């Protein structure tokens, strides 16, 4: 596998980041995961805009988006595969052992791994931990992901592939790496960004392409929703079959199936919507 690291393409044995990188020592970094289909990245312009917004929110220097785009092209060309997970990581660079940043430039890594099509339906759980909608990291795609690792491990232990969070005021928020949509009386809703959820790329496209409503929802809406589905870069639109072991009446339901169809058709027609 060939990886882009700070301006150069390197094989994975030689692509090394310092043990003093601030992304490693304190999680001071941002990232993007981009779906790549036969070497073509999906919605790359939107992903790069969010990378820049996350860096700005964290107080990192603005990334050179032309450089990042070129790095993505170089990595995709060097590693042909049918379906890939393109990972862009941008960190605070070398720094002292502590929270203070150092004087060196940020670190940029672009890597690619194989991905596989996911099933159309999955199970989820809810977790007792909350998203802090007032956190300094709210809405940023930060590399500080340990909270998600813990929640996702709990989901795996219970036979599910995703864990859903409420926020500190009991509103439905998001998954560890996905956004959540619910169908109530035939209408499609998703939590607003003010809930503390990430501004998912797939989420935004579904809202634009289907007219889904951004609605403040209590966490217990999951107990009475007619349909539930997840969206993310690699899930696309994935129906939820059960929440905490409670099976939904139909998965995918008619609204979810229609949304998945619209997403598939629109995404196929435009690789960079």
Image (cartoon, rainbow, N blue to C red):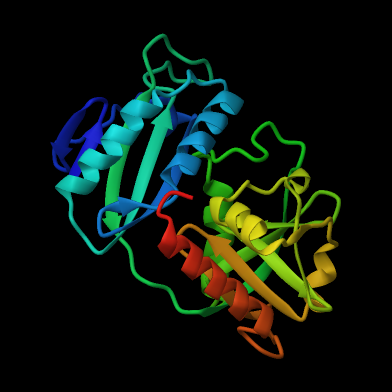
Q: Is residue 235 visible?
A: yes
Outermost residue, bottom side: 249
The answer to whether residue 245 of the structure is visible from this angle is no
Total number of numbered discs in the rendering? 0
**Left of 5 or right of it: where is 245?**
right
Q: Is residue 156 above or below residue 104?
A: below
* Towards the viewer: 237 or 269: 269
The correct choice, above or below, for 79 with respect to 114 in the image is above
Residue 214, percent across and down?
77, 55
Q: From what the image shows, is residue 183 above or below residue 89?
A: below
Nearer the observer, 111 or 155: 111
Q: Is residue 80 left or right of residue 108?
A: left
In the image, residue 55 sits, relative to residue 168, either above or below, namely above
Residue shown at the point (37%, 19%) measured from the top left: 94
Residue closest to the eye, 23 or 262: 262
Q: Is residue 191 left or right of residue 157?
A: right
């Amino acid at each position: 596998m060939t990886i882009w690291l700070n301006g150069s393409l390197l094989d994975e044995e030689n692509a090394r980041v310092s043990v003093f990188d601030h992304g490693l020592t304190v999680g001071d970094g941002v990232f993007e995961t981009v779906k790549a289909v036969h070497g073509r990245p999906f919605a790359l312009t939107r992903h790069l805009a969010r990378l820049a917004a996350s860096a700005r929110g964290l107080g990192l220097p603005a990334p050179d988006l032309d450089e990042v785009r070129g790095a993505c092209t170089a990595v995709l060309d060097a590693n042909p595969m049918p379906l890939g997970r393109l990972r862009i990581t941008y960190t605070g660079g070398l720094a002292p052992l502590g929270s203070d940043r150092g004087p060196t430039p940020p670190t940029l890594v672009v890597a690619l791994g194989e991905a596989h099509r996911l099933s159309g339906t999955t199970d989820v759980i809810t977790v007792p931990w909350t998203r802090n909608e007032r956190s300094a990291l709210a809405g940023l795609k930060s590399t500080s992901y340990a909270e998600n690792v813990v929640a996702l491990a709990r989901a795996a232990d219970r036979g599910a592939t995703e864990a859903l969070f409420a926020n500190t005021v009991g509103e439905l928020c998001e998954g560890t790496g996905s956004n959540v949509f619910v169908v109530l009386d035939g209408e499609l809703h998703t939590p607003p960004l003010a809930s503390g959820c990430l501004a998912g790329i797939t989420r935004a496209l579904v809202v634009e392409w289907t007219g889904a409503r951004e609605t403040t929802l209590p966490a217990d809406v999951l107990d009475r929703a007619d349909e539930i589905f997840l969206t993310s870069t690699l899930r696309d639109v994935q129906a939820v079959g059960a929440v905490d072991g409670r099976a939904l009446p139909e998965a995918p339901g008619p609204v979810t199936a229609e949304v998945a169809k619209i997403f598939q058709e629109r995404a196929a027609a435009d690789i960079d919507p």
